[in-house]
Amino acid sequence: MMPNKTYELRKLYFEQSDYSTKEKAANFEQPLLIQWPKSSFFNKLHIDARLLQKALTPETNYQDKTISEKIFGSEIAKQQTGLSHLSNLFYERCRLHKNHLSEINSRHMDAQERLFGVQINHTPDRAKRLSNLEGQLAQLDKERRDEELGFWKDTVELREQLFENAGEYTAAKQRDVIFADVESDYHAN
């Protein structure tokens, strides 16, 4: 008897899809405010959704913490979450820039190949096709420059915010260390 491949494939599909017939167990790791299906385009935004949930969830366990951790801990955690968010935004913009340049380069190479084919073949409409392809290459070069400029403009503010937040994070960590040193000296005496 042959195994029923159609049934197995259908079962596998429904187990992995968002339209599963089985009840999904509650997932408490997912943020309460923003939820998207895991297998969708929005999967890229789960990192930011988790960071947002982390930023909105106050810390409640203060029993085992020192006074300096109680005072500066939430500020340090907030700064760290902000840095993680900014670095995630920067990474996503860099990835988008890389994809745009890759697509432009692919179209540029295709146009150059067609231009070479037209140059070596003498057809009646050769001049018109050469002009058209050279125009496409010039347009692609302009798109590449525009993408480079757009990337720079988009990331200037992000890079500045990253450095500002890194400075604030470092300052908060230093305040925590200084206060912890004073606190340990106080307890030692």
Image (cartoon, grey):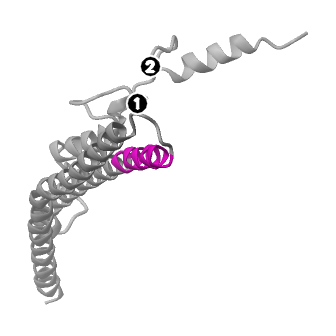
The vertical placement of 182 against 44, above or below, is below
Tell me where the magenta segment starts and ends, as one range: 103-120
Picture disc at residue 18: 2
Give the CA distance from mark 1 to mark 2: 8 Å
Q: Position of residue 116 (x, y in %)?
A: 46, 50
Sequence-wise, the earlier of marks 1 and 2 is: 2
Please tell me which residue lies in front, 77 or 19.
19
- Density class for disc 1 (Cα within 10 Å; few <14, some 14-19, many ≥20) is some
State the quadrant of the C terminus.
Answer: bottom left
Q: Which residue is mark 1?
A: 38
Q: Amino acid at mark 1?
A: Lys
Please tell me which residue lies in front, 182 or 13.
13
What residue appears at the point 10 percent right and 84 percent down from the top-left corner?
182
Location of residue 73 by image quarter: bottom left
Please tell me which residue lies in front, 85 or 89.
89
Q: Amino acid at mark 2?
A: Asp
Please tell me which residue lies in front, 74 or 46.
46
Q: Position of residue 23 (x, y in %)?
A: 47, 15
